[in-house]
Amino acid sequence: MHIDSIKEGIVLDHITAGNAMKIYNLLGLDKLECTVAIIKNVPSKKVGKKDIIKIDSNFDVNLEILGYVDPGTTIDIIHDSKLVEKKHVDLPDTLHGVIKCKNPRCITSVESNLEQVFTLTDRDNKVYRCIYCEAKA
Amino acid sequence: MRSLISILDLSVEEIAELLEVAEDIIANPKKYSEICHGKKLATLFFEPSTRTRLSFEAAMMELGGNCLGFSEAQSSSASKGETVADTTRVVSCYADIIAMRHPKEGAPLVASMYSTVPVINAGDGGHNHPTQTLTDLLTIKRKKGKLTDFTIGFCGDLKFGRTVHSLIQALSRYENVKVVLISPDELKLPSYIKKDVLQKNNIEYVQTDNLEKVLPELDVLYMTRVQKERFLSEEEYIRLRDSYILTKAKLKNAKEDLSILHPLPRVNEISTDVDSDSRACYFEQVLNGKYVRMALILKLLEITVD
C-alpha cells in the first residue's frame, strides 16, 4: 500500500495500533482542510503493528492530549520533504480540558464554566487526579 | 497572600509555628484581644455547620475583629445561580479573610483562585477540613507535649471519615508515629490511603476489629461516629455500632495518660460516663479549635505579635 510522502507537515508515528481514530477525533483533525492520512495496522519490527497519521500542513498538535492518550507516539516535523525534528511525547504533568471529572461531589459537576484540570500524581501507574476534588480520572 | 485549602499546604515548620502561636494565645489572651481590630472575617457557609462557623466567628471576635456572612446557601446568591468564583470576588471587596464551607469538593480551591483575600477551607464535602486537623494536632501537642513518638488508634468509620484521613496524612510527616486502625471490615481505611500515605511514608500500622484488645497500647484514641446510612441492614448497623462504643469499663486497661479525641458530634460511640474521665479530651479539643483558628487567621492576615 502506498501513501504519498508529505512536503510540509507532521507525521504522528508509533501510535499504538487501534488508537489512530481516537487521536484523530480528540485532536480535532476532522476540522482540517488539508490532506490527512490515517494508516492503520502498519507492520512494525518493534511492536508488531502500529498506526500512523500524516497531516499535510503545519498543525499545532495538542501535546497534552497526545501524551495522555498515547505517550509512546512520536511527532515527526517535515519541512521541504525532509524530517527536520522528531519529538517524543510523554505523559503530561497537567491536563487542561482533556478529560472530565466523574465525581458527582466535585464542584465541576455543578459549575460547568470551570476548566477541567488534572495533575499527574503517579507516573508509574498513569494516575491523574482532579485538582479540585482529587478524584482519580 | 496565602490560603489554606488542604493541611498539606502547610509545612511541618509552619504547623509548628501555628501551634506555638495558639499556645501563646491560650497563655496570654489579652495580648491578642484587639490585634484584629477593624478586620473582617466573612464566613461563607453554603451548608450549615453551626459548630465550625461559631468557632471561626468566636476566633475572630476574640482577636478584636468582626464577622459577616451567611450560614446556608439559601441565604446567599448561590440560590440565584451565582458561581463560587463570583461570590468570592464580591465578598473579597467586603472582607479581609474568608472561611468557606461548601458541600461540593474543591469549591474553596476555586474560591482561592479568584479571591483577593486569603481563603480558609472550613470543609468541602467529604474532601478536606484542614482546621479540624489543626485542632487535632494542637490537642495532641498540648496533651503529649510533642507530635512524635506515640501510638494513635483510629476507631469507628475509617472509610468515609475525612477527619481521620486528614489527620493520618498530617501525622505521616512526623517521626515514629504508630497507627492502629480499629474498625469493622465494612468501614476499613481505604486502600489508597494505606498505600499512598502509610506505606509510602513507612508508617507502622496495624488493622484490627477489636478495640479492647489494642486499647492498652494506645497513647491517643481518635473516636469517630459510625454512620447508620453506610449500612444496608439496620441489624448490621446496630451490631457494629455497639461493638465500637467506648465506655468507662472498657478504659480499665487503657494507659493512665491516654488522650481520647473525637471531632464531634458524637452519638453514642463514647458513653457519657467517659466524659468525667481525665482522659476525655474532646471538649477541650473544641476549645483548641478556636485557638488554632485564631492563630491561623493571624498567620494568613500576616499579623505578628511580639
Image (cartoon, rainbow, N blue to C red):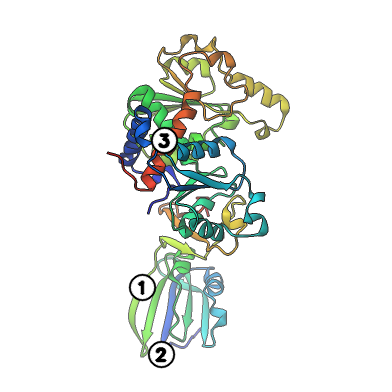
Percent x, y of residue A85: 33, 79
Residue position marked by numbered label 1 in the rendering: A87
Residue in front for this viewpoint, B31 or A3: B31
Residue at mark 2: chain: A
Eyeballing the image, is B89 above or below A24? Answer: above
Residue in front for this viewpoint, A133 or B14: B14
Residue position marked by numbered label 3 in the rendering: B292
- Residue type at mark 3: give it: Val
Q: Please, what secondary structure does the residue beneath circle 2 have?
A: loop
Residue at mark 3: chain: B
Circle 2 packing at 10 Å, graded few (<14), some (14-19), many (20+), is some
- Residue type at mark 2: give it: Lys
* Residue B203 appears left or right of B81: left
* Viewer can see residue A130: no
Percent x, y of residue B166: 46, 38
Q: Residue at x 33, y 27 (%)?
A: B146
Residue position marked by numbered label 2 in the rendering: A7
